[in-house]
Image (cartoon, rainbow, N blue to C red):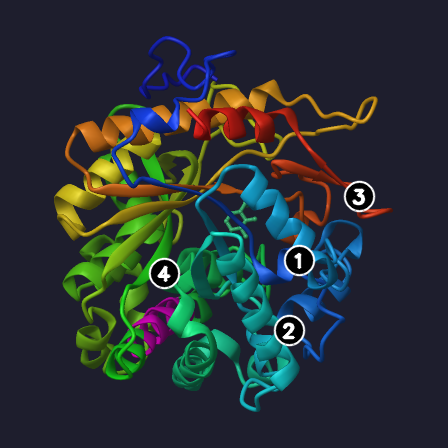
Amino acid sequence: MSDAICIDRSPEPGTARNVPIPPRSSFPEGFVFGAATAAYQIEGHKFGGAGSSHWDSFAATPGNVVRREDGSLACDHYHRWESDLDLIRDGGFDAYRFSTSWARVMPDGRTVNPEGLDFYDRLVDGMIDRGLRPFLTLYHWDLPSALADHGGWMNRDTALRFADFAEVVMARIGDRIERTATINEPWCVSWLSHYLGEQAPGLRDIRAAARAMHHVQLAHGLGVERLRGLGHDNLGIVLNLADILPFREGEEKAVATADAINNGFFIESVAKGTYPQAALEGLEPHLPANWQDDMATISTPIDWLGVNYYSRGIVSAVPGAPWPATKGHEGPLPKTQMGWEIYPEGLSNLLTRMARDYVGDLPIYVTENGMAWADEVTDGAVTDAERTSYIAGHLEAARGAIKGGANVKGFFYWSLLDNYEWAWGYEKRFGLIHVDFETLERTPKSSYYALQAALSG
Ligand code: IFM
């Protein structure tokens, strides 16, 4: 192709091999280092009275998930949580970001399963016992099938039910949680799952997507309102943001549209109570009636923002195509096992932008950042120098944003363990700790030890 890519080709971004991870002492006092996971991806959904979630049925449908794998056993964290928490503590981390499964806590979406709450109660106590600070995400995608049967995120009622779920969970463990996020990655919950069809429920429908986008934002706002009213604090949301760049000169419109769908819709509604015009252009006809009436709830003030960052997006317009009329392009940089370009600059750009344009001095946490790699155990060890470099590059980028004035308070590596990578099944390995999915044996990788050394220095 002869088209020029006008994206930054500055010397080898993100490929600094053998660059050491910056030591703890190079970050501001109190900077939080953590590791992150999510319930469905590690726990083992067949245990403890969990109900069916829409991921179980999505995975059971041929063609949706590699080898039709699901989270029924996953890493069996449900039974191995104590030794998994030991690994976090021994890695020198300060905090653990975990999520609560809605389908475990309320198998039919409404009725409480005491066994489910007991599990999270034990887990949080286990963190405290080990000196780990609990960072909770209430919803990381395991929607009870009973709610999916009634339209899931397309149905406004799901947002109301979410507030009930949030209340139940926080009534039990909220007294020991350091920070609570309502929703993980609303773009994935809505656009990726209802327009691009890549995750449960696997729809490809603009109206479904617009409604899901609005309702997931509403769920966040209702959750914050409810929890705040009950006296809980330190409430936030976790957004997956991408640094969107033009494929060639003159692609401002494509960049604005893609940025509005990926980023603006979610951050602007929370921070300012509006949806970006570039998103409304295509979505407004499909939004629920009187959506404007919900914007005050959606923008209920939060206490902190979580940013999940993995890569950039490169886009161009597709003239004559229906909205959004954009397409993505593969970039030239080295890529992870997911095929995602390694581009740490995007992290500093986004952190700086969030502080400058949206959240000001509110604490920002990098709640996820990490890479998948085809790691293998050789003679009892896993050498993953690529991951160590990736972490070093992104921690430097976070440091750069801090120097530039963004109030970045912590960094969580995704993920603690190799786990269920959704539509990719168990094929993509993001963990600091290798999991053998036959024996469930855990083997810390060399990146785990590199981080451990950096955190002690
Ligand atoms: O595994 C996911 C996680 O569940 C949400 N954020 C992105 C990760 C890697 O794809």
Q: Sequence-wise, which precedes: disc 1 or disc 2? A: 2
Residue marked by disc 2: 53
Identify the mark at residue 441; answer none if there is no mark: 3
What residue did someone put label 1 on? 81
SS of the residue under disc 4: loop
- Residue 220 lies in the magenta stretch: yes
User: In terms of sequence position, does the residue under pointer 3 or pointer 4 come before the other?
Assistant: 4
* x and y percentages locating residue 356 in the rendered image: 13, 42
Q: Closer to us: mark 4 or mark 2?
A: 4
Q: Is residue 230 above or below residue 403?
A: below
Q: Secondary structure at mark 1?
A: helix
Q: Position of residue 294 (x, y in %)?
A: 23, 78
Determine whether 119 is above or below 378 in the image: below
Which badge, 4 or 1, is on the more N-terminal residue? 1
Is residue 226 shown to the viewer in this render? yes
| Residue 300 occupies quadrant | bottom left
The image position of residue 18, as x and y in percent, is: 51, 11
Q: Nearer the viewer, residue 10 or 183?
A: 183
Q: Which residues are magenta?
A: 210-223
* CA distance separating discs 1 and 2: 22 Å
- Tell me the number on the disc at residue 158: none
The kind of residue on which mark 4 rests is Glu
Q: Does dot 2 land on a helix, a strand or a loop?
A: loop
What's the amino acid at mark 1?
Answer: Trp
Q: Point out the tag, 2 or 3, that comes first from the N-terminus.
A: 2
The amino acid marked with disc number 3 is: Glu
Foreground pick, 126 / 406? 126
Picture layout, residue 164 above or below residue 201 = below
Q: Is residue 85 above or below residue 280?
A: above
Give the numbered dot on residue 178. Answer: 4
CB under 8 Å between discs 1 and 3 = no
In the picture provided, is 277 more to the left or to the right than 20? left
